[in-house]
């Protein structure tokens, strides 16, 4: 007569429960991090209430690989300058958004701290969503 080993069902259930709790905790942490990043992004956009015109120096098309889509993609490198309070800032931005080739932009910047800026299309209200960066 063979003796079959006893299987402790409680240990298997406990192990599964631990795994479910761990995975759930990790998903919760990821969700909190994403919400925090979104909130911080919106807060910084909200402080950029002043605006200045932009001179687009150059827009280059960049052929590459879109990691989000997992396929070849096209990006744009936009070089631009803007002046606030007599000081000129020259910046560049790489974007994969479509219709980047239009040349009507402005910057929204934080009053008193013009280097804290976002490049936006003309028509976007500063302090609101719609920034390219």
Image: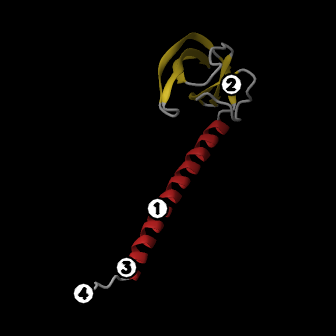
Q: Quadrant of residue 6?
A: bottom left
Residue 89 horizontal side relative to residue 19, left or right: right
Mark 2 Cα within 10 Å, few/some/many (few <14, many 20+)? many
> Residue 86: in sight, yes or no?
no
Disc 1 or 2, which lies upstream in sequence?
1
How far, Cα to Cα, is label 3 from label 4? 23 Å
Disc 4 or 2, which lies upstream in sequence?
4
Q: Nearer the viewer, mark 2 or mark 3?
A: 3
How far, Cα to Cα, is label 4 from label 2? 84 Å
Q: Position of residue 17 (x, y in %)?
A: 45, 72
> Residue 19: in sight, yes or no?
yes
How far, Cα to Cα, is label 1 from label 4? 39 Å
Q: Position of residue 74 (x, y in %)?
A: 53, 20
Q: Residue at x 68, y 24 (%)?
A: 51
Q: Position of residue 86 (x, y in %)?
A: 60, 16
Q: Position of residue 77 (x, y in %)?
A: 52, 17
Mark 4 Cα within 10 Å, few/some/many (few <14, many 20+)? few
Q: Which residue is mark 1?
A: 23
Q: Residue at x 66, y 25 (%)?
A: 120
How far, Cα to Cα, is label 1 from label 2? 45 Å
Q: Which residue is mark 2?
A: 51
């Amino acid at each position: 007569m063979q003796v079959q080993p006893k299987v402790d069902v409680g240990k298997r259930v406990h192990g599964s429960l631990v795994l479910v709790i761990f995975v759930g905790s990790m998903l919760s942490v990821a969700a909190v991090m994403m919400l925090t990043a979104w909130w911080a992004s919106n807060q910084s956009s909200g402080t950029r209430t002043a605006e200045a015109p932009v001179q687009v120096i150059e827009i280059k098309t960049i052929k590459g690989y879109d990691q989000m889509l997992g396929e070849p993609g096209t990006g744009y490198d936009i070089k631009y300058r803007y002046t606030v309070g007599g000081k000129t800032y020259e910046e560049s931005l790489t974007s994969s958004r479509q219709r980047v080739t239009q040349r009507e932009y402005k910057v929204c910047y934080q009053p008193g701290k013009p280097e804290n800026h976002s490049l936006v299309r003309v028509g976007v209200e500063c302090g609101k969503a719609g920034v390219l960066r």
